[in-house]
Image: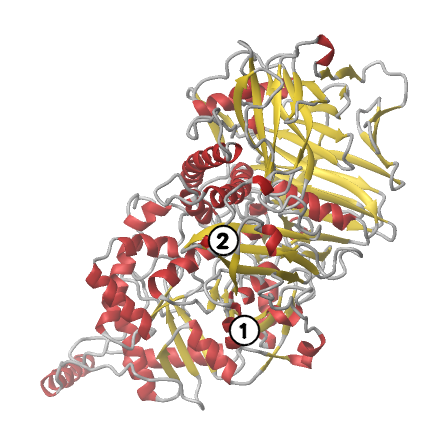
Amino acid sequence: MIMANTVMLIFTVLVSAIFVAKSEYIDYNTTHRIIPNKINVHLVPHSHDDVGWLKTVDQYYVGSNNSIRGACVQNVLDSVISSLLEDQNRKFIYVEMAFFQRWWRQQSKAKKLKVKELVNSGQLEFINGGMCMHDEATPHYIDLIDQTTLGHQFIKDEFGKIPRVGWQIDPFGHSAVQAYLLGAELGFDSLFFARIDYQDRAKRLKEKTLEVVWQGSRSLGSSSQIFTGIFPRHYDPPDGFTFEINDVSQPIQDDILLFDYNVEERVNDFVSAALAQANVTRTNHIMWEMGTDFRYQYANSWFRQMDKFIHYVNQDGRVNALYSTPSIYTDSKYAANEQWPLKTDDFFPYADYPNAYWTGYFTSRPALKGYVRVMSGYYQAARQLEFFKGRNESGPNTDALADALALAQHHDAVSGTERQHVAADYAKRISIGYAEAEGLVSSALALLVNQRSSSHVINSATGFQQCPLLNISYCPPSEATLANGKSLVIVVYNPLAWKREEVIRIPASTREVSVKDSSGKEIESQLLPLSNITLSVRKKYVKAYIGTAPPGELKYLLAFSVSVPPIGFSTYIVSKPKQTGHISTISKEFRSEGITNNSIEVGQGNLKLLYSADEGKLTRYVNSRNQVTSSVEQSYGFYSGYIGDAKDSQASGAYVFRPNGSFPIKSDQQASLTVLRGPILDEVHQQLNPWVSQITRIYKEKEHVEVEFTIGPIPVDDGIGKEVITQFSTTVKTNKTFYTDSNGRDFIKRIRDFRTDWDLEVHQPIAGNYYPVNLGIYMQDSSTELSVLVDRSVGGSSLVDGQIELMLHRRLLHDDARGVGETLNETVCIADKCEGLTIQGKLYLRIDRKGEGAKWRRTVGQELYSPLLLAFTEQDADNRLDFQQPTFSGIDSSYSLPNNTALLTLQEFGNGKVLLRLAHLYEVGEDKDYSVTANVELKKLFPNKKISKVTEMSLSANQEKAEMEKKKLVWKVEGGSNEQSKVVRGGPVDPTKLVVELVPMEIRTFFVDFNPLQTVHTAESHVAM
């Protein structure tokens, strides 16, 4: 009876309240700005939109394939713009220009005007501004620059704006190159991200060091540092404050006539979460990232709640809430005049749990990683040739390849962490881009070889052929029988700004062949019989790519030395000899079985390798020139992928490397070597088992070892996923120390089982010591250094003193539960038969005296990134080359860039401007000869053009460097570290002398204008002598 009376009383009160209260429109006050003496909660609305991951970039944009995930970026942008137009105080940031550009193209002129007003008012702000949010472990720094430049130019052209803030919230670890090169050198005032090691985050939360000044380059020091903010948790709001239409967070219910009125409760929740974050953050400013993956598809569900929170929280008065952006937040932090901790080196490796190191993706999808790297180098060469030919906006041009490569830098693309159909989409886009760029390259070369008037003119569309499958020994023009009196003509283009002497290898269908240079002089050549493995890979993958097996049975690769001028080409003729004495030398072949000597010596020049005859193993490295002699062994093995257990379900997968035991790969039969010897190079062929083999090459005129490995299909019929490694073992006393590159740029010191910023608790002694390797890895002691360079991103380490380990291939059978929802089990299907992916790649090994390895690493590193480009045509066989210009250099024939510099970008940019980037290749103290200031003479780079103006720009060329420096925020560092690390940069370019100074690790970007009336039209001075 008492309970019934109580219920009736409550009902009566509620009914009375309903009659008294009114439900009416509330004008939410969202105009609040920063209040100095309160905690200011900066609400930053954002949507993290992957340009491909579970779905392709186009599927994400249009909202198709929603059985995988209901995500539609087009809806996000439509909805956000509508919501911003409703209230001028609302703000939103957007990051991925690949999506925004798609959306922008589809808008009416009226809508575009409204959006431009939103951008100009600061309601819509572009953050980061690249085509994608790139990965930081696996891309090359030139690709990072290019994809960022593409996005920044779009923003500048359409909106006249310059992004101020880096927003790398999702990549799985963060590189030093990101901090200084893709941060400070872009003119960014700050950089923000979410993912750091769980142990590192715990310490920083405790010590209030989540926000730091990051000095990524030892060489550039404080001249290129950036304020960096690490989120206290992920890149989403605190628990209880996500408001997508299907989210479970409680909205503010402020209609008194409805049940569950909760304004006071939700305000208290907000204040509590704000105070908790303020306790781990310096100053009275905190930032909430109001959004996460593919949010704001119905933007009002977010903005309605944020409007209410700002209104009621500020009425409450305990903290101040406001719509904000990272730029506003950065300015607030700067105005606080705080001193910040100094951070150096990088944030690798990343683990989110004790047994979950995200170091597997350093190697995941090695074929895609290799393809991206090869096409990146090709793109640089194609841009140069586009400059020499003259750009054609209607095509063929390099635009499609640029767009495809930009997408491929995404942190779920080249990283290898996307689903299989998405990886195929990235590769398809690159292939389409390559096809168009290939047409440009062919037409440009045809134009250049006939630059002077000639009766023999090559058809610019079809005259030159290229061989994109040359890596698997397939090249139709070189394989064609040299019949009917025809000769094969090879144009060899060098995209580097120094002269190169290298050996090229092309398939040859006959043993009766000779090679001549462009003057008609016969040059030495060598025929190399193809191994069974090479022939098997060729047959299988040519059929996979073009649908039919290659015709005939190829027997040889033809090898010969070429000499190519800087940024230019040389021409060579391959033909049937008229006299039998002039044919190419066939390699002498022998096998190690039955050899009585204890060792086999390989190598015709200064470098020799010794192998044990009985075991077939590499044992010794000898360089007679520099008197370096070292014991060295190479081996292969694999880690079995962990599948999880009852205690810890963490498996090894696309992201995470979690080994469950290591196993050596030994020869299935008695060890044997096949050695090919010749006047140009020696080869050692080894097959360890049916799915691991390699060819080791020692060139007579080179002092490094080239190792070409073939791995796959990795067998998994035993139910065990495998992660394949190779190891180089020496007696070098390394004391746990080794060095890996940062995106192909700076080298960073690594110490096994050690972190600079915290006392590491070791749970995974293998995976926790893996680092990304894009250029190379080296180790040293007091007398010797051993370097290994790579042809694509891999994971690497030194788990034992004196040993370098690289992971080359992965095939796994379990998902690692990080969102992709698919096993990393790549297969290739031919005629309905599918098998595991086979990988072919290269490693390069050299041992030097301590302090002398940098020259090789930097020089050969550039040559690996920018290989010689080969183009083929045919002509009637005689001793005279039909070309009017058989050799060419785009720069002064007497000039080449200093050995410590590189030409990164030469690109026609429109409006008569040329985009030029020059880089110093060495760090401070890296080399006794080359770690010095370098000078580049622009007049000799452009000998036939009159330079009228040179304007130095930011790295992405969206603002003048001088203006960027004026706006730069100078942050205070604890302990006054700034004063000790100031670096003097290269000086301004004198308009008369036109000489560019470069200090170690400096990259300088320019727009160069030419006077068209004073351009020299003849190509005479371009001819290389």
Type of amino acid under label 1: Glu
Whether the residues at callouts 2 and 1 have beta carbons within 8 Å, the answer is: no
Kindly give the residue lying farthest to the left in the view shown.
Answer: 19
Q: Vertical placement of 368 versus 145: above or below?
A: above
Q: Residue at x 51, y 29 (%)?
A: 466
Element at label 1: helix
Residue tagged 1: 965
Q: Residue 58: image x %, image y %?
A: 33, 46
Q: Residues within 10 Å of mark 2 (few under 14, many from 20)?
A: few
Q: Residue 847: image x %, image y %?
A: 80, 42
Type of amino acid under label 2: Gln
Q: Residue 377: image x %, image y %?
A: 55, 42
Residue 925 appears left or right of 709: right
Element at label 2: helix
Q: Vertical placement of 818 versus 619: above or below?
A: below
* N-term mark: 2 or 1: 1
Q: Residue at x 34, y 65 (%)?
A: 159
Q: Vertical placement of 640 versus 878: above or below?
A: below
Residue tagged 2: 1014
Q: Identify the image quadrant of the C terminus.
A: top right
Along the line of sight, which residue is nearer the eye, 553 or 893?
893
Q: Residue at x 62, y 21 (%)?
A: 533
